[in-house]
Image (cartoon, rainbow, N blue to C red):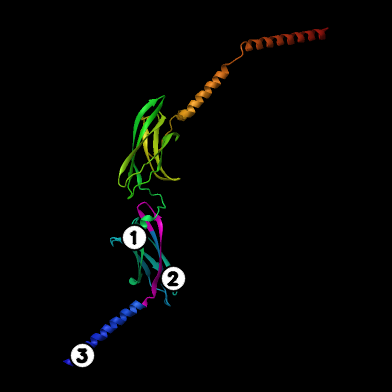
């Protein structure tokens, strides 16, 4: 009985040794390693950061590797929760070569993260490397996602004088970002729908808008009456347009303006679109020109007529006298 027990134990030890040797061989079989990781911000918005993570995978073996892929995970350092993950296939890696594998992973623009790269060969984990990053919220946005959106526009006729209409424009601005917005420049302009002529424009600002709130910015714009307009809102950050919106004002509602529809142009009086300042200068110029044209020297026309008649009489008399001499 004891002999049988010893045989069983020896067999068990032998099997365990085989399994252990097999595991060691499987682990040592792959000579792929992640030797380094580079992380840089690819794009930074007001709320998110796209991180470009490049892992350098080295094949230290004497043979071509199997099928390689890299799993990338980002964990929030404060909560430990998984923020994002992505998997990128890397194909095969030649012997004694190092291959860079780049991936993009998105995280919130705040706090810090633990970036974990897991290397697979033929669907088996062969290596793992972790890097921690801090101060994500200190990154400056490098693309202009300001978080502020033009939600809606309202129009109100305030005054009508000399065929010009003053329209009150209310622009509804919502900050959809996670941070308080900047005070940005905002251009509001009215363009005649058929001819596309600019009828009026005014500069204002968005003001500072708290995250998750909506504000109304109001201004007045003056345009010629009896025309239809597209009113555009352009929000600027430095020298770049970062947000836009538009609405329609119909002061000549004989037909409905369909966006992106083909429209037959009506007769547009171009002079209606001269600004008030330029129109005043033009009226003054025409008035001066009219006054100068009416100023005439008294009697000038009559005197000139008499002189012409006298010259004609003298010429005729001279011709008759010459004819008589020739006849004689």
Label 3 crowd (10 A; few <14 / some 14-19 / many >=20): few
Q: Does dot 3 land on a helix, a strand or a loop?
A: helix
Q: Does dot 2 land on a helix, a strand or a loop?
A: strand
Instruction: Read off the residue under disc 3.
Output: 6
Q: Main secondary structure of the magenta part?
A: strand
| Mark with earlier residue (2, 1) | 2
Is residue 302 in view from this perspective?
Answer: yes
Is residue 257 in view from this perspective?
Answer: no
Q: Quadrant of residue 7?
A: bottom left
Instruction: Read off the residue under disc 1.
Output: 112
Q: Nearer the viewer, residue 116 or 207?
A: 207
Q: Is residue 305 above or below residue 250?
A: above
Q: Position of residue 48 (x, y in %)?
A: 35, 54
Q: Which residues are magenta?
A: 29-50
Is 34 magenta? The answer is yes
Q: Residue at x 43, y 67 (%)?
A: 100
Identity of the residue furthest to the left in this view: 1
Q: CA distance from mark 2 to mark 3?
A: 51 Å
Q: CA distance from mark 3 to mark 1?
A: 57 Å
> In the image, is 145 to the left or to the right of 270?
left
Question: Residue 8 has which mark?
Answer: none
Label 2 crowd (10 A; few <14 / some 14-19 / many >=20): some
Q: Position of residue 250 (x, y in %)?
A: 37, 32
Q: Nearer the viewer, residue 249 or 316?
A: 249
Instruction: Read off the residue under disc 2.
Output: 98
Identity of the residue furthest to the right in this view: 328
Q: Quadrant of the C terminus?
A: top right
């Amino acid at each position: 009985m004891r002999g049988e027990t010893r045989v069983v134990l020896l067999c068990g030890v032998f099997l365990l040794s085989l399994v252990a040797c097999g595991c060691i061989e499987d682990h040592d079989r792959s000579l792929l390693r992640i030797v380094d990781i580079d992380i840089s911000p690819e794009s930074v918005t007001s709320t998110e950061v796209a991180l470009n993570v490049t892992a350098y995978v080295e094949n230290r073996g004497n043979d071509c590797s199997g099928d390689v892929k890299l799993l990338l995970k980002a964990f929030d350092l404060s909560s430990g929760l998984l923020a994002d993950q992505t998997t990128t296939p890397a194909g095969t890696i030649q012997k004694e070569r190092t291959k860079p594998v780049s991936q993009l992973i998105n995280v919130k623009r705040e706090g810090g993260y633990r970036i974990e790269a897991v290397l697979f060969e033929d669907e088996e984990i062969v290596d793992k490397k972790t890097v921690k990053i801090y101060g994500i919220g200190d990154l400056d946005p490098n693309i202009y996602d300001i978080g502020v959106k033009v939600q809606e526009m309202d129009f109100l006729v305030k005054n009508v004088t000399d065929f010009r209409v003053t329209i009150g424009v209310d622009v509804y601005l919502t900050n959809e970002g996670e941070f308080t917005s900047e005070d940005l420049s905002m251009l509001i302009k009215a363009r005649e729908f058929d001819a596309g002529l600019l009828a009026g424009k005014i500069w204002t600002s968005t003001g500072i808008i708290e995250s998750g709130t909506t504000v109304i910015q109001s201004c007045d714009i003056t345009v010629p009456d009896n025309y239809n307009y597209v009113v555009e809102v352009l929000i600027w950050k430095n020298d770049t347009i970062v947000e836009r919106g538009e609405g329609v004002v119909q002061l000549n509602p004989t037909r409905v303006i369909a966006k992106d529809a083909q429209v037959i142009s009506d007769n547009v009086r171009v002079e209606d679109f001269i600004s008030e300042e330029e129109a005043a200068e033009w009226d003054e110029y025409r008035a001066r020109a009219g006054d100068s044209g009416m100023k005439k020297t008294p009697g000038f026309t009559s005197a000139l007529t008499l002189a012409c008649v006298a010259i004609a009489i003298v010429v005729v008399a001279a011709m008759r006298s010459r004819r008589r001499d020739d006849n004689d």
